[in-house]
Amino acid sequence: MSMQKKKAIRLECPMPRLDFDTITLGHGSGGLLTNRLLDKLVFELLGNKQLNTRHDGATLQLDGPIAFTTDSFVVSPIFFPGGNIGELAINGTINDLAMCGAQPHSLSLSLILEEGLPITELWEVLQAIQRACQQADVHIVTGDTKVVERGKGDKIFINTTGIGRIHPQARIGTQYIEAGDAIIVSGQVATHGIAIMSLREGLEFETTIESDTRPLHEPVSQLLDTFGADIHLLRDPTRGGLATVLNEVARDSGWGIALQQSAIPLDEQVEGACEMLGLDPLYVANEGIFVAFAKKDIAQQAVELLRTHPYTAHAAVIGQVVEAHAKQVVLRSRIGGTRVVNMLTGEQLPRIC
Amino acid sequence: MSMQKKKAIRLECPMPRLDFDTITLGHGSGGLLTNRLLDKLVFELLGNKQLNTRHDGATLQLDGPIAFTTDSFVVSPIFFPGGNIGELAINGTINDLAMCGAQPHSLSLSLILEEGLPITELWEVLQAIQRACQQADVHIVTGDTKVVERGKGDKIFINTTGIGRIHPQARIGTQYIEAGDAIIVSGQVATHGIAIMSLREGLEFETTIESDTRPLHEPVSQLLDTFGADIHLLRDPTRGGLATVLNEVARDSGWGIALQQSAIPLDEQVEGACEMLGLDPLYVANEGIFVAFAKKDIAQQAVELLRTHPYTAHAAVIGQVVEAHAKQVVLRSRIGGTRVVNMLTGEQLPRIC
């Protein structure tokens, strides 16, 4: 997927003429108003053969093993530098499928709208959903729309659930991890969380940090095509950041994890914002990167392959799986000291995705 | 499924000892608190081989065509006569699968919790989810948990998305409907909506009306086993009620629909409550019934078969597909007059499911 193609489909669609400006409870009735809302907005942008049957569900024909994953998105604010809740929801579920070694096949889309939501905002979110689906060549095949009273929701919550075909060479799971495995991160950490936090804290005019929301199934597919079962685990470090996901892997696999701080890719502006906000980038949420546990022998080749794709251009080996300090993540700092890195405790960044 | 079995699994599980009484934002952090919440509550009740992998998604092996359906549940209040939002969410998605002619295989479960939700209430909802899954022999294989600030949600919203195997004999779709088809309803109408409305309006002590939430895949499976492609369409008349779903079918198929009011099964207490509340039972939401469009010749046999199952004991033929009044639903009243029945306009019963 070239960056040109991404730009080419970012054309705005003119909003249809409607006899309502905001979401009302009637749009959740299941009756005439729900049907009008769906016809004029959702089907207009997202319609396809499956969705247009308007049945209670979609019928799919898939062969071989499939991946199945769900996420609800409650990010606040719904518009942020680099995207909005719409593409976040599509890319997020595509990426969860990719972490199972699967290529996205079909998605469901379920909206919980707050009474009073301006239709212009809903339209913008639906356009982002359309673009993200086009970019990843995935279809929304079934959906649902509910409306809650003002003050009982927050503009828009989105659930996307995805089905994907698992790559025939994929053997992904904590049970495949071995001592010596290289730990690769596919890009710079902490970007999404800091983009959102900068906006909340009024720093967005001082930086050009944008969310890294993007689909990762293509580089993952290339990895699996080339290295197959030598890729032992894939995980995306979203909420809780890199530190939390690595702790989960250490706990679930029983191995120790050794990290080199100097190897972890981190944008200078993001690093500066983390310092200003008092946040450790290891705990800040990501959307557009993944962590791969790969057989040591192929790790450098895997990094080189990832660097050829624009979405994983900053890939790097950041550590290794070790027999020492079982179930613990230990970081060697830039100045040579070591410290145990625990899972996120408390709530650093509420509603980051 | 005998009623005995249903009762047998309705044992209460004692709530685990926890060091928190209510949901906090930290439970949505993705870090330690999220992990504790999941360990102590969700995995305790719903754990299984797939869910326990704690990966970003589940891996499934299904052969043949599958159905895929999603629903978000925002019912208010979350506890109501006859059930709570937990079993409603499981049964609702099972029923959407059943309407595609599919038997439930796997579900995803995504929770949006409001800060301050008492853990006892969450436990009760999760227990209902467990019971409903056990009753239908379906597993939750993947999930997600988010927390929103107090006043940005309403206790608990649940998304369930389901995958099911489509019955090999199923040929379900508006394109299969023919003039002369009998329209069967599987049980009494308006029960769920009136159970919720009675509670909201303070009538619950005057009636014994309970929600009809229940899984319908078994009677549907029996119908398809016996009558196969002679069952032309299945739909569950949830939001918007029987009138709305029949209008959708008339619109999408292009046929007319003729209903006999006297044939529509309606509980006496529900009818009385509808009169008190000024509601037309044809527009009131249902959860535990479905509408089948069946070839005329087998309709009476189909009704007799349905009446042998406790969940569809009140099944009846309520009308037929006609060439006259294309795309319209016309009701012949008890006293012999006829009137056009339109789709629900406005919002009769917000947040009924």
Image (tube, coloured by chain):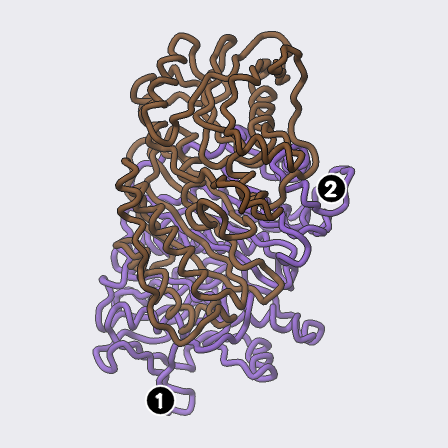
Chain colours: A purple, B brown
Q: Position of residue B268 (x, y in %)?
A: 52, 29
Circle 1 sits on which residue? A338
Q: Residues within 10 Å of mark 1 (few under 14, many from 20)?
A: some
Q: Chain of mark 1?
A: A
Q: Chain of mark 2?
A: A
Secondary structure under tag 1 reads: strand
Q: Does residue A192 show up?
A: no
The amino acid on which the numbered mark 2 sits, given as a three-letter code, is Met
In the picture shown, does residue A38 fall above or below B29? above
Secondary structure under tag 2 reads: loop
In the picture shown, does residue B287 fall above or below A191? above
Q: Residues within 10 Å of mark 2 (few under 14, many from 20)?
A: some
Q: Earlier in the sequence, mark 2 or mark 1?
A: 2
On residue A296, which mark appears?
Answer: none
Circle 2 sits on which residue? A15
In the picture shown, does residue A140 fall above or below B231? below
Of residues A126 and A351, which is closer to you in this image? A351
The amino acid on which the numbered mark 1 sits, given as a three-letter code, is Thr
For image coordinates 51% across by 57% down, the residue present is B156
Q: Position of residue B227 (x, y in %)?
A: 34, 17
Of residues A12 and B52, which is closer to you in this image? B52
Are labels 2 and 1 on one chain? yes
Tell whether A100 sits left or right of A349: left
For image coordinates 63% across by 41% down, the residue present is B349
